[in-house]
Image (spheres, rainbow, N blue to C red):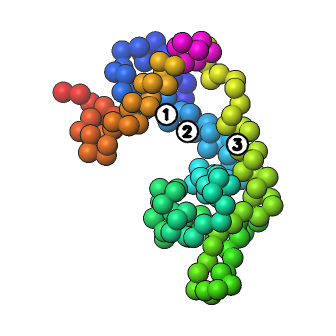
């Protein structure tokens, strides 16, 4: 990975800076998940969903994790092999399978929650509660207002040059 010239970043539009910051944060988070927990972001989402909701069907879990059921199958297979998730047959209906955390999965989920709730600021800017609130409002508004259609219409978010 190459070092980024921060001086040159001052001329980049805010939307593109947001994308770059998100990519850098995601890369660092994904590396931490892999190194510390042996997980991917999708695996983390499954653990947290099961931790928060308890046993779920495959379809319910796919909806909560924003993935299609066929995609979830591979994620659950990996987590099951790691001993973090188990498939349980419903006693009343053998066709029905519920997904649940194992004890190790519950411990991993709780460790993830503790890590995410770490109050240490990412930067000196978000260490200031007033500035952090402005950043939070900005990010929440982007999340709420940027539909897939709107995002597709904003070229700078996709790395294209402005005309």
**Labelled disc at residue 26:** 2
Q: Residue furthest left?
A: 163
Name the spot of residue 77 as percent of width and height, x first. 64, 70
Name the spot of residue 108 as percent of width and height, x first. 76, 51
Question: What residue did someone put label 3 on?
Answer: 113
Q: Residue furthest front?
A: 92
Mark closer to the chain start, 3 or 2: 2
Query: Residue, x 61% and y 36% (percent of image)?
Result: 28
> From what the image shows, is residue 88 above or below residue 65?
below
Name the spot of residue 9 as percent of width and height, x first. 43, 18
Question: What residue did someone put label 1 on?
Answer: 22
Please identify the quadrant where the C terminus is shown: top left
Element class at badge 2: helix
Question: Depth check: 109 or 75 in front?
Answer: 109
**Relative to 8, is 102 on the left or the right?**
right
Asked if labels 2 and 3 touch by Cβ distance under 8 angstroms, the answer is: no
> From what the image shows, is residue 143 above or below residue 123?
below
Please identify the quadrant where the N terminus is shown: top right
Q: Is residue 54 visible?
A: yes
Give the crowd class for mark 1: few <14, some 14-19, many >=20 residues within 10 Å.
few
Q: State which mark lies toward you, 3 or 2.
A: 3
Q: Is residue 131 magenta?
A: yes
Give the crowd class for mark 3: few <14, some 14-19, many >=20 residues within 10 Å.
few
Asked if labels 3 and 1 touch by Cβ distance under 8 angstroms, the answer is: no
The CA distance from mark 3 to mark 2 is 17 Å
Element class at badge 1: helix
């Amino acid at each position: 990975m190459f070092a980024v010239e921060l001086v040159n970043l001052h001329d980049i539009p805010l939307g593109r800076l947001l994308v770059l910051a998100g990519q850098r944060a995601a890369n660092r988070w994904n590396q931490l998940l892999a190194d510390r927990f042996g997980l991917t972001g999708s695996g983390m989402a499954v653990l947290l969903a099961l931790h928060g909701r308890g046993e779920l069907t495959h379809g319910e879990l796919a909806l909560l994790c924003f993935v299609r059921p066929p995609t979830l199958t591979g994620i659950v297979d990996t987590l099951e092999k790691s001993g973090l998730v188990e498939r349980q047959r419903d006693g009343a209906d053998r066709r029905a399978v519920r997904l649940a955390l194992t004890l190790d999965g519950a411990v991993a989920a709780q460790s993830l929650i503790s890590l995410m709730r770490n109050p240490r600021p990412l930067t000196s800017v978000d260490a200031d509660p007033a500035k952090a609130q402005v950043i939070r409002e900005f990010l929440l508004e982007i999340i709420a207002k940027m539909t897939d259609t709107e995002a597709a219409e904003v070229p700078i978010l996709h790395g294209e040059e402005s005309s």
